[in-house]
C-alpha cells in the first residue's frame, strides 16, 4: 500500500549530523528503541559523507547536531529547530560554551548524549526564538582600516 499525499506531507524528518569527528555516543543516543518510537514506524537512513548538508537541512523538521559552530549556524540560518549535543570526549570542549550560550538565548536546545531522550520528550519547539545574524560590516570596516585598506 503506497503513501497517500496526506501521509507524505505529515512525515517528519530528523537530520542528525556528527560533523567530521567520530561521535559514537550521539549515534547510540539516537539509535535506540525510545527514539524510534518503539513501533517500527521510523525509517532510518544514513550516509557517511555529504559534500553539502544544505539539502538535508532544508528537508528536516528537526536537526540534532554536534556542537560545531559551522553546523550550528548553518542550521539556525535555515530556520530549523535544533538540538545541539556536546561531544564530551573531545579534549578541549570549547564548543559547549557556544551551545550553552545559544540555548540560554532560546535559539536551540542543548543536550549531552545521556540527556538527549529527556530533552526530546520535554522540548517545546514553539518556544525557540529565531536566530538573526548580526551585521558584521562595522567590524569588517574597522579591521580593514586597521590593516591599511581603503574605505569603500
Image (cartoon, rainbow, N blue to C red):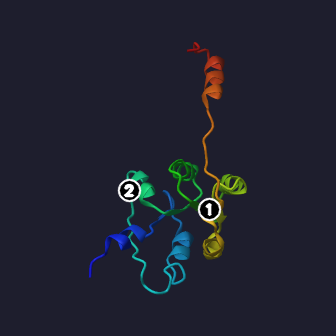
Disc 1 is placed on an element classified as helix
Whether 78 is drawn above or below 127: the answer is: above
Disc 2 from disc 1: Cα separation = 30 Å
Q: Residue at x 66, y 22 (%)?
A: 142
Badge 1 is on which residue? Answer: 126
| Quadrant of res 8 | bottom left
Is 146 positioned to the left or the right of 46 in the image?
A: right
Is 83 positioned to the left or the right of 58 in the image?
A: right
Q: Nearer the viewer, residue 115 or 23?
A: 115
| Quadrant of res 1 | bottom left
Q: Earlier in the sequence, mark 2 or mark 1?
A: 2
Q: Nearer the viewer, residue 92 or 40?
A: 40
Is 7 positioned to the left or the right of 17 in the image?
A: left
Is 95 positioned to the left or the right of 23 in the image?
A: right
Badge 2 is on which residue? Answer: 50
Q: Position of residue 28 (x, y in %)?
A: 53, 76
Amino acid at each position: 500500500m503506497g503513501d497517500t499525499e496526506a501521509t507524505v506531507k505529515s512525515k517528519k524528518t530528523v537530520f542528525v549530523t556528527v560533523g567530521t569527528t567520530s561521535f559514537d555516543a550521539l549515534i547510540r543516543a539516537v539509535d535506540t528503541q525510545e527514539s524510534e518510537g518503539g513501533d517500527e514506524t521510523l525509517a532510518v537512513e544514513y550516509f557517511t559523507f555529504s559534500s553539502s548538508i544544505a539539502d538535508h537541512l532544508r528537508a528536516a523538521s528537526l536537526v540534532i547536531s554536534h556542537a560545531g559552530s559551522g553546523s550550528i549556524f548553518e542550521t539556525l540560518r535555515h530556520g530549523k529547530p535544533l538540538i545541539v549535543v556536546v561531544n564530551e570526549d573531545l579534549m578541549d570542549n570549547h564548543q559547549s560554551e557556544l551551545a550553552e550560550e545559544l540555548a540560554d538565548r532560546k535559539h536551540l536546545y542543548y543536550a549531552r548524549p545521556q540527556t538527549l531522550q529527556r530533552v526530546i520528550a520535554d522540548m517545546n519547539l514553539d518556544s525557540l526564538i529565531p536566530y538573526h545574524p548580526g551585521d558584521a560590516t562595522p567590524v569588517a570596516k574597522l579591521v580593514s582600516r586597521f590593516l591599511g585598506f581603503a574605505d569603500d
